[in-house]
Amino acid sequence: MQDEITTLAFSGRIDASSSTGMEEDLVRVMDEGHRHIIVDLSGVEYMSSAGLRVLLATLKRIKAMKGELRLCGLQPFVREVFDMTGFSKLFTITETVSEAENSIRA
């Protein structure tokens, strides 16, 4: 199980109210021992600082587990938020899930 790649896809708006569900999903898969996680954001049209916080906490925990976290499919507005906050430099971001999988396997 430790070497398999788990992909979680989110959609809609990731804000203060919906980020808790995203966090619960990510924590659950990490608690199950998954260390290679792809977060597919292709369906996300908006992300607030609450969503960014969840992703940053996930990145820190995955690194502590000696795992890999990839983000993919950022829509233009979400990409802009990542660029403006400097988060684009913190995360490995790809266009597609398959590119994310290949970067983990590399």
Image (spheres, rainbow, N blue to C red):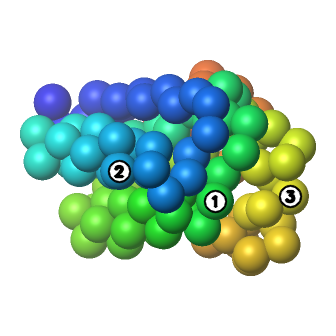
- Name the mark on residue 48: 1
Quadrant location, the C terminus:
top right
Q: Residue at x 43, y 61 (%)?
A: 54
> On the picture, is 95 further left or further right than 72?
right
Q: Is residue 22 visible?
A: yes
Q: Is residue 14 left or right of residue 78?
A: left
Q: Secondary structure at mark 2?
A: helix
In the rendered image, the vertical position of residue 65 relative to residue 78, given as above or below: below
**In the rendering, at what x and y percent does residue 67 appear?**
32, 55
Residue at figure coordinates x 74%, y 75% from the top left? 85
Element on which disc 1 rests: loop
Indicate the position of residue 2 as horizontal and vertical percent values: 18, 39
Q: How many marks?
A: 3
- Residue topped by disc 2: 20
Q: Residues within 10 Å of mark 1 (few under 14, many from 20)?
A: some
Amino acid type at image mark 1: Ser
Identified by mark 2, the residue type is Thr
Most distant residue in the bottom direction: 86
Inspect this view and state whether residue 102 appears. Answer: no
Q: Position of residue 97 (x, y in %)?
A: 60, 26
Of marks 2 and 3, which one's residue comes earlier in the chain? Answer: 2
Give the residue drawn at x 28%, y 29%. 4
Q: Which residue is mark 3?
A: 80
